[in-house]
Amino acid sequence: MTHRAVFVALLVLLLASGGAAAQAWAPQRNVEIVAASAPGGSNDKTARMLEHLLSGNKLVTSSITVVNKPGGGSNIANTYVAQRVGDAHVLLIAGNALMTNHIIGASKLTIADFTPIASMAEDYAVFAVTGGSPLKSGKDLVERMQKDARSVSTGFANAFGSTRHIAAALFVKALGGNPRDLKVVVFKGSAEAIPAVLGGHIDLAVVGAVNAVPHVAAGRMRILGVGAPQRLPGVFANAPTWREQGIDVVYGSWRGVFAPRGLTPQQSAFWESAMQKIAATPEWKSDLEKNLWTDNFLTGAALRKEIERELVATRTVLTEIGLAK
């Protein structure tokens, strides 16, 4: 080869390798997975499972740390991540609060301050009463609510405008009532709401299914209706959905993975691919089943479209409740 030919060949190799490098990205330092809950909370459980599967399946070769940022109705965690603009080494486990906090005026952050990576799971609400409640069925609750919604004290976690509050409001709306007529009691968590309904301090609790499992199994709690598209398994196999009972209510708390805004397409693509691989593992599927969560995996354009739809629907119901600013 002539010197010119050798130079041209080397130039082609350099350009090709440079193009490949521009297309590929992977974490080069510690990755933080931020959970807006204390250790043991739902977001924390999700964060730790993702950390386990990312490391165990060698999807990420750098170290990974789960960072707990509880409090402020998820605002502390959300703010922490939003401030890391362009940093693809930090991920947030988040859900509806990314929308609701801004809509009700609790945060200046919007969904645009984050990069959506993947929707991972949906946690549907169950409507529960104590085993000795005079409300024996979904029909009893419907009749009572239609007669006087304020006669049923309804408890949930962890703030006004939360996903459980929205589920209860949608239920009243589906009955033809005014969501503002709900008599609500807000608790710091389901760990407080469930004892309150079991002790007869409130009439009804709207909680995540997994929180009710031991009480339903022991006969201490009865499920009047489930806000899922189909019946849940296990101890809930005999608990009808609201749709089965003629009430068009399907609403849950979705859990997703977000990064700060400002990621490159290559960085977003890396994390989307990693989450897709996780969602296909037997361990992840087993964890969904254990927690009674439903797979709602989405990425890319499909996820962004679903977020836009959810944003409109959430603003509508929060306006009807009287909480939208």
Image (cartoon, rainbow, N blue to C red):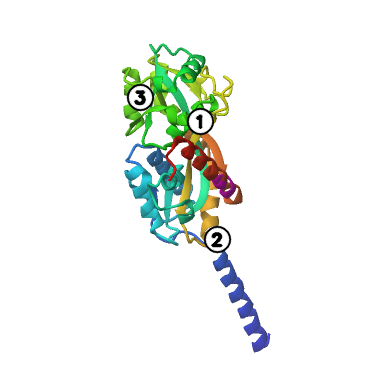
Q: Residue at x 52, y 29 (%)?
A: 173
Q: Residue at x 52, y 25 (%)?
A: 232
Residue 156: % across, % down: 38, 30
Residue 117: % across, % down: 51, 51
Label 1, label 2: how far apart the Cα atoms are: 37 Å
Judging from the image, what secondary structure is the residue with disc 1 in?
helix
Q: Main secondary structure of the magenta part?
A: helix
Pointer 2: what residue? 265
Q: Residue at x 57, y 49 (%)?
A: 304
Pick the quarter of the image with the N terminus: bottom right
Look at the picture and state if 147 lies above or below 112: above
Look at the picture and state if 228 lies above or below 161: above
Q: Is residue 307 magenta?
A: yes
Pointer 3: what residue? 194
Of the residues under marks 1 and 2, which one precedes in the sequence?
Answer: 1
Pointer 1: what residue? 170
Q: Nearer the viewer, mark 1 or mark 2?
A: 1
Which amino acid type is marked by label 3?
A: Ile
Label 1, label 3: how far apart the Cα atoms are: 21 Å
Could you classify mark 1 by the number of other residues whose Cα lies within 10 Å: few (under 14), some (14-19), or many (20 or more)?
many
Q: Which residues are magenta?
A: 304-308
Of the residues under marks 3 and 2, which one precedes in the sequence?
Answer: 3
Judging from the image, what secondary structure is the residue with disc 3 in?
helix
Residue 109: % across, % down: 42, 53
Q: Are marks 1 and 3 in contact (CB under 8 Å)?
A: no
Q: Nearer the viewer, mark 3 or mark 2?
A: 3
Q: Are marks 3 and 2 in contact (CB under 8 Å)?
A: no
Q: Nearer the viewer, mark 1 or mark 3?
A: 1
Which amino acid type is marked by label 1?
A: Leu
Q: Residue at x 50, y 21 (%)?
A: 225
Which amino acid type is marked by label 2?
A: Pro
